[in-house]
Amino acid sequence: MTLHESIKGELKEALKAKDAVRLRTVRGLLTAFMNELVATKRTPQDMLTDDEVLTVIKRSAKQRKESITQYEAAGRTDLSEPEKEELAILEAYLPKLMSQEEIKPIVEAKKAELGVEDKSKMGVLVGAVMKELAGKADGADVKAVVEASF
């Protein structure tokens, strides 16, 4: 069973459980999946691959994080709370990302391998580390670890 199919099944479970937050989140995801299918010129009956599903979920999670930040900056906790609930549900579908402590040895190894010694080559180092850790680490965390290594 693909991730797309399992999320479709979660819609039924959320309906039966009358879980409004999960239902709203899963419906939003399924709509995003449909939009992705349309954008890639496929029929709605097609299924996204697991990688495509994860990309869509990451995009949705990123949107929620940005919304939470903006709502809290504006002092609108009434709007940020539902976003936080949806973000928690979305993060349950995503694989666990590496922590900064786990990223640090990889950054040091790449730094030595590429011979990067100053900040002028920082972009090259970040790119190399991100290529190695594709999908396993957040770009902001990688950038923070690379900046701290100089």
Image (cartoon, rainbow, N blue to C red):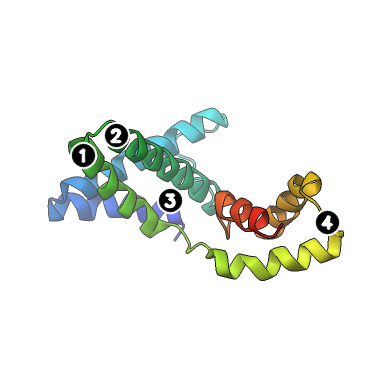
Specify which label sits upstream in the sequence, 1 or 3: 3
Specify which label sits upstream in the sequence, 1 or 2: 2
Q: Which residue is mark 3?
A: 4
Residue type highlighted by circle 2: Tyr
Q: Which residue is mark 1?
A: 77
Q: Which residue is mark 2?
A: 71
The reply to whether the C-beta atoms of the residues labelled 3 and 4 are less than 8 Å apart is no
Q: Nearer the viewer, mark 1 or mark 3?
A: 1
Q: Give the class, few, some or many, for how many residues have Cα within 10 Å of label 2's Cα (few <14, many ≥20).
A: some
Query: In the image, 89: left or right of 107?
Result: left
Query: In the image, 50: left or right of 33?
Result: right
Element under label 4?
A: loop
Q: Is residue 102 above or below residue 8?
A: below
Number of dots carrying numbers: 4
Residue type highlighted by circle 4: Val
Q: Cα distance, mark 1 to mark 2?
A: 7 Å
In the image, 82 versus 12, the foreground residue is: 82
Q: Cα distance, mark 3 to mark 2?
A: 30 Å
Specify which label sits upstream in the sequence, 3 or 2: 3
Q: Position of residue 137 (x, y in %)?
A: 57, 58
In the image, 64 versus 9, the foreground residue is: 64
Q: Which residue is mark 4?
A: 116
In the image, 38 versus 77, the foreground residue is: 77
Q: Give the class, few, some or many, for how many residues have Cα within 10 Å of label 3's Cα (few <14, many ≥20).
A: some
Q: Is residue 119 above or below residue 148?
A: above
Which residue corresponds to the image point at 22% horizontal and 56% vertical from the top-left?
A: 13
